[in-house]
Image: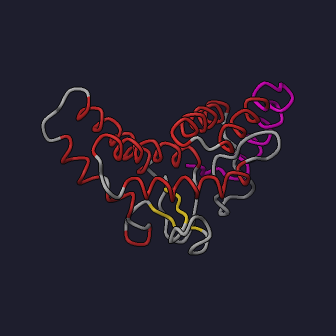
Amino acid sequence: MARQEAVHAECLCALVRAVSLVRLEGADEAVRVAFPGFGTTVDDGGFLREIGDAGDEAGLATLAFIEEYPMPRRPSMTLGGHLRALWAIFDVGRVLSEEDAPGLFDRCLLGLIFSLDRYDTGSWSRHDLDEGWNGERLADRETHREHILGLETIHGMSGRKALRDTARRWEGYEADLRGRFVASAQRFGFGLRNPRVR
């Protein structure tokens, strides 16, 4: 399955830079055409998965998570994809003043914070929360590092201490030779149990 949202988020970030840095004609309109996919639910063909109950956090309608692999009946909640999407949403709001972007960013930020502990195994980070796998899918070392950098980046955007604290804890996991070995062994076992990992 193609990494639809990941490409979508990266394209949005590139287009925003085309608007802000080189004033590329038509880039702002391309962003405005592409951006609504983030605010459209997976059931309606978009990337947005609503989580939690109405009014749980700051009176928001729901918390939200951006899906990298948008499948209506199988939430995957891939962490790296959500972090890239947050960055793209932040950029769209900052550079183009898209009126829906700040609210969506807040909902997705709270969705991240609400879900974050579920990605922490106590010795490594999980790639996703997909319950359709046979076992937990851990991040490979490169993706684990991307998670750390993504959390640090979103902390810089939001000031949310939980993100920085988690990034620092995961840096400790990365520095632990035994933890890296155990995570590698678990990923190998996961691959044997799930030969069709996308």
Establish if 17 lies above or below 52: above
Can you tell which quarter of the image residue 188 is in?
Answer: top right
The front one of 122 and 107 is: 107
Quadrant in the rendering for residue 153:
top right
In the picture as drawn, the residue positioned furthest to the front comes out as: 58
Residue 40 at x, y percent in the picture: 38, 65
The number of numbered badges drawn on the structure is: 0
Return the residue found at the far left.
25
- Report x, y in % for residue 87: 45, 41
Q: Residue at x 23, y 54 (%)?
A: 33
* Left or right, 95 with reference to 57: left
18 on left or right of 161: left
The correct choice, above or below, for 172 with respect to 62 in the image is above
Question: Residue drawn at (43%, 72%), measured in percent from left and top?
Answer: 43
Residue drawn at (65%, 58%) of the image = 114
Q: Which residues are magenta?
A: 173-198
In the rendered image, the residue lying farthest to the bottom is 54
Along the viewing direction, whichever of 7 and 63 lies nearer the viewer: 63
- Percent x, y for residue 159? 58, 40
Percent x, y of residue 131: 67, 63
Q: Given the current orientation, which residue lies at the most extreme right position?
A: 178
In magenta stretch: residue 177: yes
Q: State the image quarter where residue 53 is shown.
A: bottom right
Secondary structure that dominates the magenta span: helix
Residue sitting at 43 percent across and 58 percent down? Answer: 103
Q: Is 22 left or right of 193, judged from the image as shown?
A: left
Residue 93 in magenta?
no
Left or right: where 10 falls relative to 140: left
